[in-house]
Image (cartoon, rainbow, N blue to C red):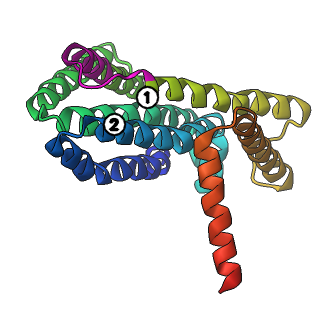
Amino acid sequence: MAQRIVTVIAGVVTGAIGVSVPRLSYYLGKGDKEAYVALVNRGSRIFNFFIIPLSFGIMVLGPNAILLYGSEKYIGGGILTSLFAFRTIILALDTILGSQILFTNGYEKRITVYTVFAGLLNLGLNSLLFFNHIVAPEYYLLTTMLSEASLLVFYIIFIHRKQLIHLGHIFSYTVRYSLFSLSSVAIYFLINFLYPVDMVINLPFLMNTGLIVLLSAISYIGLLVFTKDSIFYEFLNHVLALKNKFKKS
C-alpha cells in the first residue's frame, strides 16, 4: 500500500527524466557542451522544484495518506509511506546523474557495475537483518535506501573524476528546495499540537490534514516568491497564459 502511493510519484520522475535523454545526446553529438549543461541543470532544477516538496509533504503526512488511500487497518504502514517518500528524492538524483550524465556520455558499463555493487550491498545488508531475525519492513527499506545512496555517491565521484559536469548547480537547488520544504515538518507538528485529532476519517481529521497541506503550500510558495525563484515565476506565467487562452476561447 505504501509503495503503491509513492511509486506513482517515482514513475512520473523517471519518465519525465527519460524524455530529455535523446535531446541531451543530440547536444553532445553536436559538440554543444554548453547547451547540454544548461539542459541538465534546468531539467534537474524543475524536477526538484516539484518532487521535493511533494515528497516532504507525503513524508510528514504518511499515516494520513495511508488512512485516506486505504483504511484504518493499513495505518501501520504510515512510516513506510514516509520512508518511500524520502526515498523518491534519492531515486530522482540517481536517475538524473545516471541517465542524463553517465548514460548520455557513453558510460553504460559504469552504470551497470555501480548498480550491481549497490544491489549486492543491499543483498548483504538484508541478509544481516534476516539472520538476526529482524523482519520489520522499515529496516529492509532503510537498507535499500542506503544502497541507493551509495549508488549516488559512486555517480558523484565518477562524474567529478571524469569532469563530465559541475554538480554544484544540481545539489545547490536540491538543498534549497529541501530547506523550503522543511517548513511542512514544522507546520505538521504545530497543527497537531494546537489541533490534535484521532486517526479516524471524520471532519476534524480532514480539516487537520487539509490545513497542514494548505499552510505547507502557502509556506513553500511564499519562500519561492521571497527568493524570486525563476522556475516558480516561469511556471506561474505558463498558468496565467493558459488561463487567458481559455478565457479568449
CA distance separating discs 1 and 2: 9 Å
Q: Is residue 218 in sight in this rendering?
A: yes
Q: Which residue is mark 2?
A: 96
Q: Is residue 7 left or right of residue 94?
A: right
Q: Position of residue 97 (x, y in %)?
A: 30, 31
Q: Is residue 184 left or right of residue 26?
A: right
- Choose top left, top right, bottom left or bottom right for residue 78: top right
Q: Which residue is mark 1?
A: 170
Q: Is residue 136 in sight in this rendering?
A: no
Sequence order check, earlier mark of 1 and 2:
2
Secondary element type, mark 1:
helix
Q: Number of marks in the image? A: 2
In the image, 91 versus 63, the foreground residue is: 91
Q: Position of residue 214 (x, y in %)?
A: 78, 47
Asked whether the residues under the numbered discs 1 and 2 touch, taking CB atoms below 8 Å apart as contact, a structural biologist would say: yes
| Three-letter code, disc 1 | Ile
State which region is magenta.
150-168
- Prevalent SS, magenta region: helix
Q: Position of residue 200 (x, y in %)?
A: 75, 49
Query: Which of labels 1 and 2 is toward the front?
Result: 1
| Three-letter code, disc 2 | Ile
Residue at left offset 40%, top offset 29% = 141
Q: Say few, some or many: other residues with alpha carbon within 10 Å of mark 2 (under 14 / 14 to 19 / 20 or more).
A: many
